[in-house]
Image (cartoon, rainbow, N blue to C red):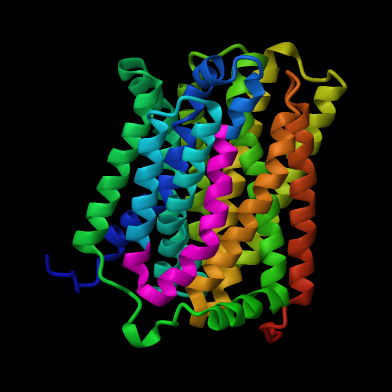
Amino acid sequence: MTAPTKTLSRPEFVALMAVMMAMVAFSIDAMLPVLPRIADELSPGNPNAAQLILTSFLFGMGIGTLFAGPVSDAMGRKPAIYLGFALYLGGAALATIAPSLETMLLARILQGLGAAGPRIVSTAIIRDRFEGREMARVLSFVMMIFIMIPAIAPFVGSLVIAAFGWRSIFGAFMIFALIGLTWLAVRQPETLAPEARRPLRPASLKAALIEVLKHPMVRIYIAVLTLGQGQMFAFLSSVQQVFGTVFGVRETFPLWFMGIALVSGSSTVLNATLVMRLGMRRMAMGAYAMQMALSAVLLAAGLLDAIPAALTFPAFLLWAVSIFAMAGLTFGNINALALQPMGHIAGMAASVVGAVGTTLGVCIAIPIGLAFNGTIYPLMIGTLICSSLAWWLMRLSREADPTPKKVIPAP
């Protein structure tokens, strides 16, 4: 097969990158309806342990993220993604026959290792073509399509397991991966020229790693991403239990989740519209301030029994929408800010930013998720703390940014 050489149109490029990134979201969200069945079969004595099905995948992805970028800098973007797909498909195949929770967690870690390839290298591909606010705008369009896949993933997952059993969901993961792999191979040209590749040597990797971690602004943005992803991962790991245990809507959970994701998807449209005018930092600060205020108000109202019983579920739905909206208004912007000074080592930078943010985010999410006690308060408290710290760090980044500020002359 002849390698493609024609640059994709922006709509197709955005759609393809969205599919590459959405493999992660699909692998998480489609599992949500399956967790009660896995708990019943593989961990009947400890239902909360089923949450580890999600966080083990994220942990594997965090580790794989550290290597995906450097491999892509050395081999090229597409070969690195092919390697990731191979690991992902192997993990999905193992999960279909896993006889115990421990084996299932191992399979999910392997899936996560593989998913890191398409997820991180696609970010490097976008950085190869765009930079700055234009990159943030493209990432917003990617997220606009991306949000549709996790929105319908639990519903699709519930249909698949109803028809073929819960293990068949891993077959659906394999089909989704093969579609993305074929599309990439047939349509997307390689974006990293051979002369721009960095040898995969310990010395060069160490030099690039040090360069990324020594940059003070990048360190701040990594910390912000860690906090943002930590609260998002905690929400995803607990949301099925919240709907089923707290509100008693286990059977209709996939439909509620789809509605939440679709409504919050408008945040990516808002970001794409405003980011060129307001800038990435202001958009992120506003999103974290919104989340901080809403979480504080609803948490206080709940603890004081100030919310009428008939409004508790609608109030939770509003808060859940805000969690997804926050992600749409921050993740793409923070990634673009972190990669802005690292264009010459975009793959390595994307790996370090993604690996540290994801693995530490999982470390934040696990205790919040396991603290579930039949109420939404542990989740709300964790979200409030994470958003508050993220907002403070973004404000700190504004003061510490060495980039010269534009001076608007007085009229």
Q: Does the magenta-highlighted stretch encompass residue 94?
A: no
Residue 156 visible within the image = no
Q: Position of residue 171 (x, y in %)?
A: 32, 33
- Residue that extends furthest to the right in the rendered view of this protein: 304
For residue 337, say whether it is visible.
yes
Picture quadrant of residue 379: top right
In the image shown, does 154 or 139 lie closer to the viewer? Answer: 154
Above or below: residue 303 compared with residue 391: above
Of the 4 image quadrants, the one containing the N terminus is: bottom left
Q: Viewed as shown, does residue 151 lie left or right of 281?
A: left
| Residue at 68 percent of width and 25 percent of height | 315
Q: Please give the name of the residue rendered at 66% of the width and 33% of the height, measured from the top-left corner.
A: 319
Residue that extends furthest to the left in the rendered view of this protein: 1
Residue 129, placed above or below residue 275: below
Q: Position of residue 257 (x, y in %)?
A: 51, 28
Judging depth in this view, the residue of 230 and 58 nearest the camera is 58
Residue drawn where x is 49% and y is 13% of the image: 251
Q: Which residues are magenta?
A: 53-80
Name the chief secondary structure element in magenta: helix
Horizontal side of residue 139 vs 2, given as left or right: right
